[in-house]
Amino acid sequence: MNQDAYFSALSTALHAAHVARPTLVIDKQRLDANIDHLLEIINRGFAYRIVAKSLPSVPMLDYLMRRTGSNRLMCFHLPFMMQLVEQFPAADILLGKPMPVAGAQRFYDWYQSRAEFLCFDPDIQLQWLIDSRQRLQQYEDMARRSNTRLRVSLEIDVGLHRGGFQCDQEFSRAIEHIERSEFLQLAGLMGYEAHISKIPAWLGGSNKAYAQVQQQYQAFCHVITEQLGPDALDDLCLNTGGSTTYPLYGEAGPQNEISIASALVKPTDFDVDTLEHHQAAAFIATPVLKRITDPDIPMAAGLSGWLRRFGLIKRQACFIYGGNWLASPCYPANAKRSAVLGHSSNQEMYELPDDCLPDVDDFFFLRPSQSEAVFLQFGELAIYHQGSITDWWPVLDYPKAEHTDPHTPLFAQRPAMIEKG
């Protein structure tokens, strides 16, 4: 199906669903095709962990968990993790970044106030990510005060250089620290390697970067087996991967688990060589409010005419409902954000080619550059399948302020950002 036919069919479905406001649309057929590509890699011998921040919707996560058979989630925001603990009591959760110890304490205060109603057991289902000896000590002190035992995974630097342990004496001491502590248990390692797909050819390219990551990851594993014995890795979660790198994993190496999510909807930030076989599955659809011919710069009609004559301002433009998202226009083809009036979150202006003039109330489409922030701006995701909008999937709720009493309900009903059409 060509671009005109695809977006015409999508527009028809949105009109049939009486949509009349900016809407984040998920193409379920394309989502399924991307999941199938993921399964080809996972079936080579990896466990799969779903990155919840990139697909922040309980129904979407539930769908992905059922399609892939995985109960493993990676969480990056503590208030969202609390919702997932309630919604997915059988989930195995790994924190995707190290949290301030005060945040971890808040989680346990919240959990203890609800323990009798929850089926989730953090002692066996939760891994905190630790990136330094200092944070390791902080978490041990918290666990001692609470008389609990924490499962911790160590963030290791395998080439990205975004923090975490180096393969040196500090890492060895951290392993020793955990081993002798009655309040800590080593759950695994997490080595993020998003840099692989961005290494230019003159530095060796992605193949060289991937090989170095494998070598570095193996070095960390060697330290563990040297200190804890040859079977020490058997029960550990050895996590790696990302949306732009997961297709490179042809066979299991030192790692046994891969995390991805954004590749399944493919925002524009993920238009990379390693994901050429994936399809964009997320679009912002927003109504055209106004059409403009010969747009003028305010107070400068003469200058505007001169700029149009030399092609510096297009002769056709439109104003859309909303705007200023982390997104790029994709339909009508060759539409471009106008510089005449600048950014607007209310009615943003886009220049149009002369041969493609959408009518007022037609839909204008953009592709998000990322999913984790953009999805949360739209309240509900419209699910497009077989020519119709078949469902609406809510996104995760925003939390109350951090200073609220942890023993009161954490999540209030969020006012609708924009009413559903």
Image: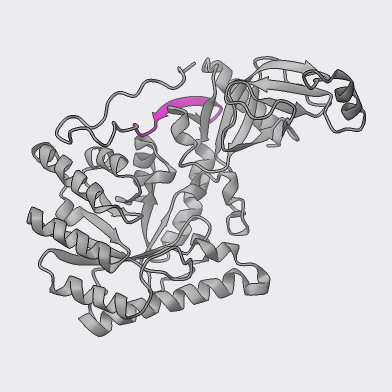
Q: Look at 28% across and 66% down and name the residue there.
A: 188
Name the one closer to the observer, 265 or 145. 145
Q: Is residue 233 magenta?
A: no
Q: Look at 30% across and 23% down and name the residue there.
A: 413
Residue 329 in view (yes/no)? yes
- Stretch of the chain drawn in magenta: 386-397
x, y percentage for residue 321? 60, 20
The residue at the far front in this view is 299
The residue at the far bottom in this view is 226
x, y percentage for residue 409? 19, 29
**Quadrant of res 110:** top left
Residue 278 in view (yes/no)? no
Name the one closer to the observer, 39 or 299. 299
Looking at the rendered structure, the number of numbered marks drawn on it comes to 0
How is this picture coloured?
Answer: one colour
Q: Look at 88% across and 32% down and name the residue there.
A: 311
Q: Look at 68% across and 37% down and name the residue there.
A: 1
x, y percentage for residue 325? 57, 33
Residue 272 drawn above or below residue 352: below
x, y percentage for residue 88? 25, 42
Q: Is residue 121 left or right of residue 33?
A: left
Q: Is residue 46 left or right of residue 266?
A: left
